[in-house]
Amino acid sequence: MISHEAILHFIWKFKLFSIIHLQTEGKDDLQILSFGIHNLDAGPDFHNAKIKIGNTIWAGNVEIHIKSSDWQRHQHQKDKAYDNVILHVVWENDLQIYRTNGTAIPTLTLKNRVDNKIITNYDQLKYNNYWIPCEAQLHRVDDFTKQQCLDRMSLERLEEKAQSIAELHHQLKGSWEDTFYITMAKSFGFKVNSLPFELLAKNLSQLIIAKHKDQALQIEALIFGVSGLLNRSFTDDYPNLLKKEYQFLKVKYGFIELGVELWKFSKTRPDNFPTIRLAQFAALILNVQHLFSKMIAVDDLKDFYLFFEYLSVQHYWETHFLFDKKVEIKSANIGKASIDSLLINAVVPLLFFYGKQIGNSFYVDQAVKLLEFIKPEQNLITKGFEARGLKAKQAFDSQALIQLKKCYCNDKKCLNCGIGLKILRT
């Protein structure tokens, strides 16, 4: 017995049933001229289908259910939106159904027309507890299908990120520099602190920063002050100097600080502490003016790294991860993996959205090429797929794997995944 209606949608959409000597439940000859367009919104399941019953050609919609009695269970007999249904496709026919005006709707039963292997394959994907539903069958899928799936997933992830940037761009009344500034700040939070970084950038405008561009101490005082991390007593001279400088600037501009509780230090490596990331963000602001304008002027992909590779934080951070806690000398400058993350999560989606917004494919292509240029990310998801035979060759692939796992595998949306479809159709 079929347990989920989605598999019937799949069978109908891909014509995975015998069409020899089709007949309705009323024993009328049936010919399917067009299967229609899958409708993912409310209303009948397939629009604009065309069928021939006897000598009459019908054009309209197709509704699909496991049992024909589901028509009444879903209250379609009271909904005029279903009056244009020309064929009711079911796994099992247990009731004659009618439109709101009382006319009968022809029914096609698929139960004896579908290869049971399709149902078995679907159940194996849907009802298991593997890390990804298809891991027992993944080795049977050809490389071309896998790469096609990854290409689609990577672009889908790009579109989602671009949509988030589009909303921010709208809020900022079309300012590209401000959009990029806030997007970049959010990316400096590296997931765990992305929210406070975003709030910091929104509370500390570029207009104010521009007035202090040549003063390294003031830039860092502004950033740490608005972050709320200066709202305590210190023993070291440097944080006290920052605090003194910020108190003057606060009176001048009327800042409201973030709550210290927003910043996450636990379960974070010291070189990822928000204090270090804030110092690195301050170095970026201090050394690169009009960042967005310079980013879109880059031709050589290697030059994207130049914005970050030579940033130098204040000397204090070479011996500190936190205020008042001295450590051995270490490098506080931003590392290669972190630069890759900033490019992937800020520069690439911004270029992609910018190109789409102004109708210039150069920036869209540049975004994709940059993802293909960057090494693949190393995380639990990419390592999990690699252990199961699906290895990312560049960041374009690793972004695809993240999208695949989070948006499809975790929810077992195998019928919407190219790899899942290949397994089901094999």
Image (cartoon, rainbow, N blue to C red):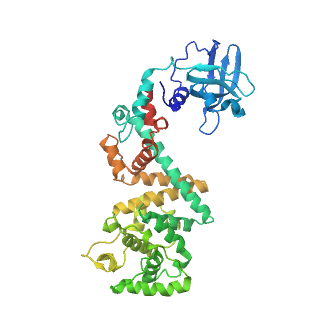
Q: Name the quadrant containing residue 32.
A: top right
x and y, in percent, of residue 99 in the image: 71, 26
Closest to the observer, 175 or 366: 175
Quadrant of the rendering where the C terminus is positioned: top left
Residue at left offset 43%, top offset 36%: 419
Measured along the vertical axis of the image, is residue 97 above or below residue 255? Answer: above
**Residue found at the far left of this picture:** 328
**Residue found at the far right of this picture:** 101
Residue at left offset 50%, top offset 47%: 156
Measured along the vertical axis of the image, is residue 352 above or below residue 140? Answer: below
- The answer to whether residue 36 is seen in the rendering is no
Closest to the observer, 48 or 298: 48
Residue at left offset 50%, top offset 56%: 349
Residue 28 appears left or right of 121: right
x and y, in percent, of residue 408 in the image: 45, 42
x and y, in percent, of residue 207 in the image: 56, 76
Residue 250 appears left or right of 230: right
**Residue found at the far front of this picture:** 73
Q: Name the quadrant containing residue 133.
A: top left
Residue at left offset 65%, top offset 21%: 51
x and y, in percent, of residue 256 in the image: 53, 77
Measured along the vertical axis of the image, is residue 293 above or below residue 75? Answer: below
